[in-house]
Image (tube, helix red, strand yellow):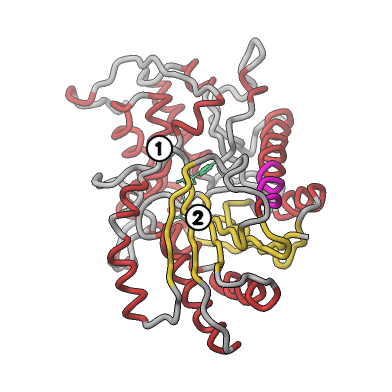
Amino acid sequence: MYTLPPSRQIKWHSIRSLPPMSMEQVLHMNGEGEETSYAKNSTFQRKVILGTELILEESIKRLLHQTTYKSNLKVVELGCSSGPNALLVVYKILGIINETVMSLNREAPILQVYLNDLFGNDFNGIFKLLPDFYQRIQERGDNVGSCLINATPGNFYGRLFPNNCIHFFHSSSSLHWLSQAPEELTMGEEPLNKGHIHLTYTSPAIVYKSYFEQFQRDFKLFLGSRSDELILGGSMVLSFLGRKNALFEIGDSGVLIGIVLNDMVLEGLIEKTSLDCFNMPLYCPTMEEVKQIIEEEGSFTIQTLKTIQISWNSHLPDDIDVSILDNKVRGDLISKSLRAVMEPLFSFSFGKDIMHELFTRFGRKISQIMEIETLQYTNLIMSITKR
Ligand SMILES: C[S@@+](CC[C@H](N)C(=O)[O-])C[C@H]1O[C@@H](n2cnc3c(N)ncnc32)[C@H](O)[C@@H]1O
């Protein structure tokens, strides 16, 4: 059996389960300065953003042709996190506006941008990138009146802006996060999702139902809030993790890290009850589920709704020749990238001391699975317009 070196031996942990209302205080990506920061480990999410470029372009062009925006266009990046991705979409939008207003022979609007995320987000990390960002816009020679950047900390499952004032919302890799894990799973005498931290291919129907209903409530609240804030004809481009069909697959990060946590329970490194009570506040819907919710909520017309498959190899940094990497190194690098997203939540529930061990084992598990499976994520992409 694997034994931890003495310096890394960890005693039984008293693990806190996450009270629902503290999600918005606890959830954030790893902050600036660390080797495992989100800023340094978000190549995958950047590739997701680049995969939506065409839809973004169509959507902004439609907006500029169809809506009256006078001299001021208000755009929001929801769940912006920290690091370069936070400003990537703004940079793209400025380019699209520039090209479109030139072809329409119109004056460029002032672009007012609101960067939104939860309260623990490293907004200062983004502010430090702004001088370089403004310089890049200038160097590209954009015919933009001006671009004013604001921060709007807050929970996107609720109101963030006054009525009828925003023209466009964008959000990428964020809406699969729920406002909380389904409460029903831990309210009875026995935790309903014992031995797992997420939905798996063996989950009982009641666990799936609880997760789906939580996603339904959250996504409807999100749509209703954004619909109140958007001007008529305003639109949103959203992309987030989904799943291909009704089944949950082995190649799901929540399933894999759940297997690793179970191994650590067996070795006495984590308390069983803590694992039994922990459920990831995350849901990956199918395209049909999303379509059904948007139609039921009724505020938006769907312009585009599709899925794209993205390889887990997209987590690997761009400056490395991935063709020469063996699966062990790939597993380690992918685990590091996922650590930037998952660590604050896992650390809150299972303790900070155990994080190095957890993500080292997770890397090993990923490399083992990569030997037998091609790991891919399903991403949902949509463009929707306020009715
Ligand atoms: C994986 S990051 C994606 C960041 C960025 N959009 C990108 O594509 O790189 C997800 C972000 O969504 C934020 N988030 C999750 N739930 C949220 C909520 N209810 N309200 C606001 N932000 C939220 C998280 O804090 C996190 O920064």
Q: Is residue 232 left or right of residue 327?
A: right
x 53%, y 68%: residue: 51
x 51%, y 78%: residue: 108
Q: Amino acid at mark 2?
A: Leu
Q: Is residue 15 above or below residue 148?
A: above
Which residues make up the magenta segment? 221-228
Q: How many marks?
A: 2
Q: Residue 235 occupies which quadrant of the picture?
A: bottom right
Callout 2–callout 1 Cβ contact below 8 Å: no
- Residue 135: x and y, percent? 30, 72
Local crowd at mark 1 within 10 Å, few (<14), some, or many (≥20)?
some
Q: Residue furthest top?
A: 189
Q: Amino acid at mark 1?
A: Gly
Which residue has dot 2 on it?
375
- Judge by depth and name the residue closer to the eye, 160 or 337: 160
Q: Name the element at disc 1.
A: loop
**Residue 247 — which label?**
none
Q: Residue 307 occupies which quadrant of the picture?
A: bottom right
- Residue 302: x and y, percent? 75, 62
Ligand 1 within 8 A of label 1's CB?
Answer: yes
**Residue 120 — which label?**
1
Instruction: Name which of mark 2 and mark 1 comes first in the sequence.
Output: 1
The quadrant of the picture occupied by the C terminus is bottom right
- Residue 332: x and y, percent? 32, 48
Q: Is residue 131 above or below residue 375?
A: below
Q: Is 5 inside the magenta-drawn segment? A: no
